[in-house]
Amino acid sequence: MEESRRRFAGEYPDCSGRTPGQTVQGDAASLHRLAVILLDNAIKYAGTGGAVTLRLAAAGSQAVLTVHNTGTPIPPDRLPHIFERF
């Protein structure tokens, strides 16, 4: 989160995150890359003065990473395609 916050410093002042005591097992470099991509996109599309929130929670034996911004929502008809390469 700090990396993304620095990258967009001054444009999006309200960045917050909560990951109390949560750990995730996996390839650290891949997980870092995923988090940076998600945060960068959330910050980019939050708009100037927007807010971005990151949460990591446990759901049984799985980790759930949630990135939320205050920007315009993705249209429902586009949701099935958000992970397709373009």
Image (tube, rainbow, N blue to C red):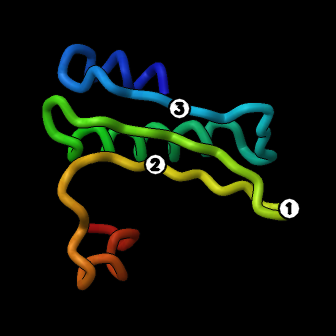
Residue 34 screen position, x and y as percent: 51, 46
Above or below, 1 relative to 66 = above
Going by the numbered disc 1, the residue's amino acid type is Ser
Outermost residue on the left side: it is 48
- Estimate the spatial distance between the alpha carbons at disc 3 and disc 2, rounded to whole Å: 9 Å
Say whether residue 77 is left or right of residue 80.
Answer: left
Q: Which residue is mark 1?
A: 61
Residue that badge 2 annotates:
67
Q: Quadrant of the C terminus?
A: bottom left
> Tags 1 and 2 in contact by the CB under 8 Å rule?
no
Residue at image location 46% in from the left, 28% down from the top: 16
Task: Give the residue drawn at x 57%, y 43%.
Answer: 55
Q: What is the secondary structure assignment of the residue under circle 3?
A: strand
Name the residue: 63% across, 37% down.
Answer: 29
* Residue 17 or residue 5, whichever sits in front: 17
Say which mark, if any, is on residue 17: 3
Local packing at callout 2 (Cα closer than 10 Å; few below 14, some 14-19, many 20+) is some
In space, the residues marked 1 and 2 are separated at their CA atoms by 20 Å
Tell me how far mark 3 sits from mark 1, CA to CA.
21 Å
Nearest the camera: 68 or 86? Answer: 68
| Quarter-of-image position of residue 49 | top left
Q: Is residue 58 left or right of residue 5?
A: right
Q: Of the residues under marks 1 and 2, which one precedes in the sequence?
A: 1
Q: Quadrant of residue 7?
A: top left
